[in-house]
Amino acid sequence: MLSLLAILLLSFLLGMRHATDPDHVVAITTIVTRQRGSANAGLIGMLWGLGHTFTIFVVGTMIILLRVTIPPRVGLSMELTVAAMLILLGVLNLTGTLRWLQENFTPNLRCFAPDTELFDSPASSKNTNSKPRVSARCKSLGLFNILRPLVIGIVHGLAGSAAVALLVMTTIHNPWWAIAYLLLFGIGTIAGMMLITALLARPLAFTFRRFSGWNRGMAVASGLLSLGFGLFLWYQIGFVDGLFGSHPRWTPH
């Protein structure tokens, strides 16, 4: 029992480490460059983690309980979806499409603009002795900012679900303990991604208030990073690992 509890604790810590994988950080960076506070960024990290955990739990449970075998070509295709998503995020960011979507589907866009009032009334802004009260609309993320990290997290979960489930099967032979491992692994991933996004948002919020041009450059840089890393993964999975060939080689990791 003690060894099982130790393994479950380890699963939480491994989940937090899993959140720091390069493809995860690159993808989430394209999102938080548009956020101006640690609270909203942390919430976005939590939503990404929820989507990621959902996929890992569903696919992992199927593998553990039903003993589903994933062929190499299917496994590589699941990982290729991450590369495709990173390329798409990079292109959308560089072309300004992500900004257009945010402008049209995010009700609190004014909270991100440095030259607009964020107060409930003109009187509150004139009173220098009172603490400014942020408008209620500045406290919500909006449907677009909620769905985007969820979908990205779900796609990322496809790439890691098989590897996590296979690792659990070789370590824990009781299927229900193995499923508990998956849940704690997912909770650790959520916690890790919340911490990462909150930390990323801190310097971005500081520079946004003082160097708006630098912050626009960060958005472009994150788009280039996402595009470049996605193309690298596409080449690695498609040609080096042989997905586009006749003899694919897939090692879950």
Image (cartoon, rainbow, N blue to C red):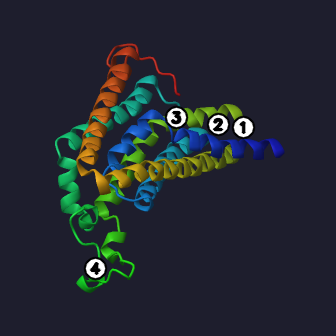
**Left or right of 174, for residue 77:** left
Q: Label 1 belongs to which residue? A: 173
- Relative to residue 57, is residue 221 depicted above or below? above
- Please report the residue visible at 70 percent of the width from the left and 34 percent of the height from the top: 171
Q: Which label was assigned to residue 168? A: 2
Q: Which label was assigned to residue 98? A: none
Q: Nearer the viewer, residue 232 or 36?
A: 36
Task: Determine which quarter of the picture holds residue 100.
Answer: bottom left
**Left or right of 93, for residue 39:** right
Dot 3: element: helix
Q: Earlier in the sequence, mark 2 or mark 3?
A: 3
Q: Earlier in the sequence, mark 4 or mark 2?
A: 4
Check whether the beta carbons of the residues at disc 4 and disc 2 lie within 8 A of each other.
no
Dot 4: element: helix
Check whether the beta carbons of the residues at disc 1 and disc 3 lie within 8 A of each other.
no
Dot 1: element: loop
Q: Which label was assigned to residue 162? A: 3
Q: Earlier in the sequence, mark 2 or mark 1?
A: 2
Q: Label 4 belongs to which residue? A: 125
- Relative to residue 182, is residue 109 depicted above or below? below
Q: Nearer the viewer, mark 2 or mark 1?
A: 2
**Residue 75: % across, % down:** 44, 29
- Please report the residue visible at 40 percent of the width from the left and 33 percent of the height from the top: 78
Q: Earlier in the sequence, mark 3 or mark 4?
A: 4
- Relative to residue 210, is residue 10 depicted above or below? above
Label 2 sits on what residue type? Answer: Val
